[in-house]
Amino acid sequence: MFCKEYLKDLNITQAAIRTGYTEKTAHIYGSRLYKKVKVKAYIDKLMKKREKRIEINADWVVKQWIDLIEICKGAKPVMIKAGKELVESGEYRIDSFGANKALENLAKHLNMFKEEKQPINNLIQNFVSGNGNQYEGKTKKEIENDIKRKVDTAFNGRRPGNRL
């Protein structure tokens, strides 16, 4: 039941609420359900069935984005009212917002904005190597504490994101 509810809006919390969990706990239990291998497999199966039924898949979506980009880039005449009729003003306008949004969605689909996250060990190693031998012979904990102290000093004891 959760899987079918999830397909309605692809919202884990709302699917859990619709299947009987309280608003207070739905995000927890919904997340737990969604992480289960069998649940994900069943959702994938249902999504593939839906794709076949409505004949829409990732290729279709990409083609629509490309068509939308071309439409939005095309110059459209600005119409003005002349009496009771609309006539072209001689000016032309393009929908740059629509083209930009379609390009953004296409780039996301192609993973062009993929962010690489570095584990703390790599960040510390990069920090150490960038500062010569300043931390040579020190433990990871000593390095972390020194970095935290420097951050605290730089922000007068207030970390970015902390409330004033």
Image (cartoon, rainbow, N blue to C red):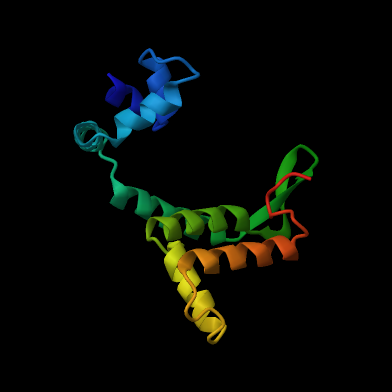
Q: Quadrant of residue 97?
A: bottom right
Q: Is residue 156 above or below residue 79?
A: below
The outermost residue toward the top is: 20
Q: Quadrant of residue 108?
A: bottom left
Q: Position of residue 82 (x, y in %)?
A: 79, 45
Give the number of marks: 0
Q: Quadrant of the C terminus?
A: top right
Q: Position of residue 29 (x, y in %)?
A: 37, 25
Given residues 107 and 116, the one toward you in this image is: 116
Residue occupying image coordinates x 51% and y 78%: 128
Q: Quadrant of residue 115?
A: bottom left
Residue occupying image coordinates x 50% and y 63%: 141
Q: Position of residue 130 (x, y in %)?
A: 54, 82
The outermost residue toward the bottom is: 132
Given residues 4 and 105, the one toward you in this image is: 4
Q: Is residue 157 left or right of residue 95?
A: right
Q: Is residue 17 above or below residue 132?
A: above
Residue occupying image coordinates x 29% and y 52%: 59
Residue 160 visible in the snapshot: yes
